[in-house]
Amino acid sequence: MYTTEGFTGTICNTPLIRLSRLSEETGCEILGKAEFLNPGGSVKDRAAMGIIHAAEASGELRAGGTVVEGTAGNTGIGLAHICNARGYRCVIVIPETQSQEKLDLLRVLGAEVRPVPPKPYSDPGNYQHIARRLAEETDNAIWAAQFDNTANRDAHYATTGPEIWHETEGRIDAFVAATGTGGTLAGVSRYLKEQSEGVRIVLADPPGSALYNWVKNGDLQSVGSGSITEGIGTSRVTANLEGTAIDDAVMPADQESVDMVFRLLHRDGLFLGGSAGLNVCAAVQVARDLGPGHTIVTILCDSGARYQSRLFDPSWLAGKGLQAPDPASI
Ligand code: PMP
C-alpha cells in the first residue's frame, strides 16, 4: 500500500507548476510551487507543522495542551487542522481587518477566534503580543510565535527548499517570494544557497512594507501607502528573516498583482490569492531583468477562495482605487 499518515502526512510535496503562457512570453521558465494544494490550503501548513513538531519534541507542548497564535489567517488555519488531528485546543488572535472567509473558516475548524483591532507592533495591543500574553496565562499552552520561532524557517529549509531543488533538477536561477514572517524566503534561501551560491534570491514586497528599502539600502523605511494583499509585508526584520541572504527586492503595484490574479484565473485556470498574484508579477519582473533562458521559481501561496468577497468583487476593488480587469482583455 502507498499511504500517507493522517493530516500532517499530506503536507508538502506540492507540484511545481510551469506557467506556460508567462514562460513563453518571457522566454524563461516561470514556475509556481502549488502551496494552495496543501491540505489546509496554504504555504503556512508547513510552518504550522514545523512549529508543533518542534514544541512536541522539546516537551513544551504536552497531551491535551493549547496552541495560541496571532495570525493573519493561514497559519491559524493550518494550526487548527493540526490541533484537531492531535487533540490540542487552538486559540487564534487575528486582526479584525482580515477577510471574513478566513475568520469563518477558523471558527468552522473549531478554533477559538479572537478578532482584535489592528495595532502597530510597537503597541501592546498588537495581535501578536495579545497571543503571547494569552499563552503565558494558560496552563500547558504554547505561543506558536510564527514570526520569531525559527522552527518556521527550519520547516522550509527541510521541505520547501529541497523539493524545489529536486523538482528543478538543480536548474534554478532565481527564487522570488513575498514575506509575512519570512519563514518561506529564509528557509528556501538557506537551502538553495547551500546547493549553489549563484541562485538569486529576490524578496517581493507589497506597497506599504518596509522590507523593499531594507534590502535595497539597509533602511527599514516603508514605501507606498498600503496594499490589499494579505499575510505579507512588514515593518520589522523577524528572527526568521534575520541573516538571510537576499540579493534584490521588487515591489509590484497592487493593480499589477490584481491583474495577474485575474490573468492566472482566466488564462491559466489557476484560482489564487493576492500574494500569489504579487509573487508571479515579481517572478515576471525578475525574468525580464535576467533575460531569456532563465528558470525562476515562486510560491503560489493560497487559493482565491479565501478572498472571494474582496479580490473578486469589482465594487470592493473600486473602493480601494483598483479595477477588476475585463477577462476578455487579459
Ligand atoms: N501569502 C499568504 C497568503 C500568507 O498568509 C503568508 C503568511 N502570512 C505569506 C504569503 C508569507 O509567508 P511567510 O510567513 O512564510 O513569509
Image (cartoon, rainbow, N blue to C red):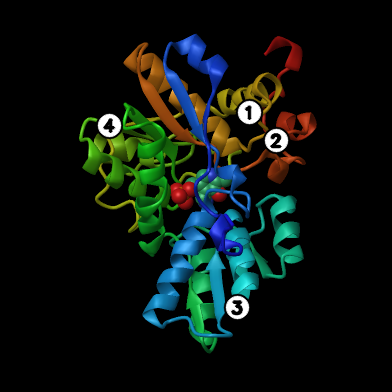
Q: Quadrant of the C terminus?
A: top right
User: What residue do we see at 54% from left, 23% from top?
Assistant: 19
Mark sitting on residue 163: none
Q: Is 135 drawn above or below residue 204 in the view shown?
A: below
SS class of the residue under badge 4? loop
First in residue order: circle 2 vs circle 3:
3
Q: Secondary structure at mark 1?
A: helix
Q: Is residue 235 left or right of residue 110?
A: left
The disc, 3 or 4, on the residue closer to the chain's N-terminal end is 3
The CA distance from mark 1 to mark 2 is 9 Å
Specify the amino acid type for callout 1: Val
Instruction: Specify the quadrant of the image occupied by residue 111.
Output: bottom right
- Going by the numbered disc 2, the residue's amino acid type is Leu
Quickly name the residue at label 2.
311
Of marks 2 and 3, the one in the foreground:
3
Distance in Å between CA atoms under marks 3 and 4: 40 Å
Tell me the residue that label 4 is attached to.
199
Residue to which mark 3 is pinned = 88
Q: Nearer the viewer, residue 320 or 325?
A: 325
- Give the residue number, with chain letter if any, for mark 1: 261
The amino acid pointed to by label 3 is Tyr
Q: Quadrant of the N terminus?
A: bottom right
Query: Tag 3 or tag 1, which sits nearer the N-term?
Result: 3
What element does badge 3 sit on?
A: loop
**Of discs 1 and 2, which sits in the foreground?**
1
Residue at 54%, 54% (x, y): give it.
Answer: 11
Is the Cβ of the residue at disc 1 closer than 8 Å to that at disc 2? yes
Please indicate, yes or no, whether residue 71 appears anywhere in the rendered image.
no
Q: Nearer the viewer, mark 4 or mark 1?
A: 4
